[in-house]
Image (cartoon, rainbow, N blue to C red):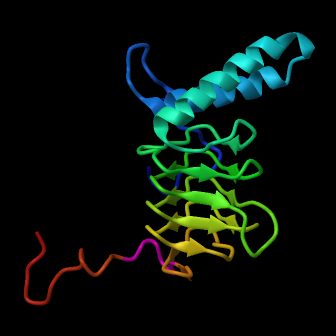
Amino acid sequence: MPEDVSAEAVDVRRDRVGWLQWWPSARMLRAIRGYQRWRRHGWWAWPLRKQAIVRARFWNIICGCDVPVEAQLGRGLMLPHPCGIVIHPDAKVGINCMIFQGVTLGNGPKPGAPVLGGHVDVGAGAKILGGVTIGDHAKIGANAVVLCDVPAGATAVGIPARVIIRKNADAQSPASADRPGESPK
């Protein structure tokens, strides 16, 4: 998705799952959202909440992850390979985020739980620990251990993660620049 997209624009195609389609992570997220929808209703909705909790736990087991029903997950969240994902119940995930396998959003040296902005991509095996804030359109590299805030549009890589800020997003990358002595195509 292009980076000029607003952090508030939800890609609804990410939430769709067909009736006979085997997509465990989408079914787990649907069960979690069902619980959160029925939680807003009164005491009469307790059987529906219990049913949603059982469905969410079932899909957590199938996916091999731990995503609690209390977590605040934005629309358009994608978990392409949900195996090993652990999310703190107080964590907040923005819209259109993509979280790969083995990611942990949990407690750390800074008190609180992580907050991810919109359109954040978190690489496989990354750990985001403590009350850190990840800005919109940020990218977290694979196996990075993030212990500090990451500004919007930046990339965090390494153990512990260091933040790389893109100075000019419109500039050509060195790989795409014309080589000396070659004519442009």
**Is 161 on the left-hand or right-hand side of 32?**
left
Disc tally is 0
The region drawn magenta spans 166-171
Q: Name which residue lies at 48% across and 78% down.
A: 168
Q: Which image quarter is the C terminus in?
A: bottom left
Q: Is residue 167 magenta?
A: yes
**Is 81 on the left-hand or right-hand side of 183?**
right
From the viewer's perspective, is residue 20 above or below residue 178?
above
Q: Could you say where residue 10 lies in the image, as x and y percent from the top left?
A: 58, 38
**Is 109 on the left-hand or right-hand side of 22?**
right
Q: Is residue 2 magenta?
A: no
Q: Name which residue lies at 72% across and 25% down.
A: 35
Residue 155 can be seen in this image: yes
**In which image quadrant can residue 124 be found?**
bottom left
> Which residue extends farthest bottom?
180
**In which image quadrant can residue 30 be found?**
top right
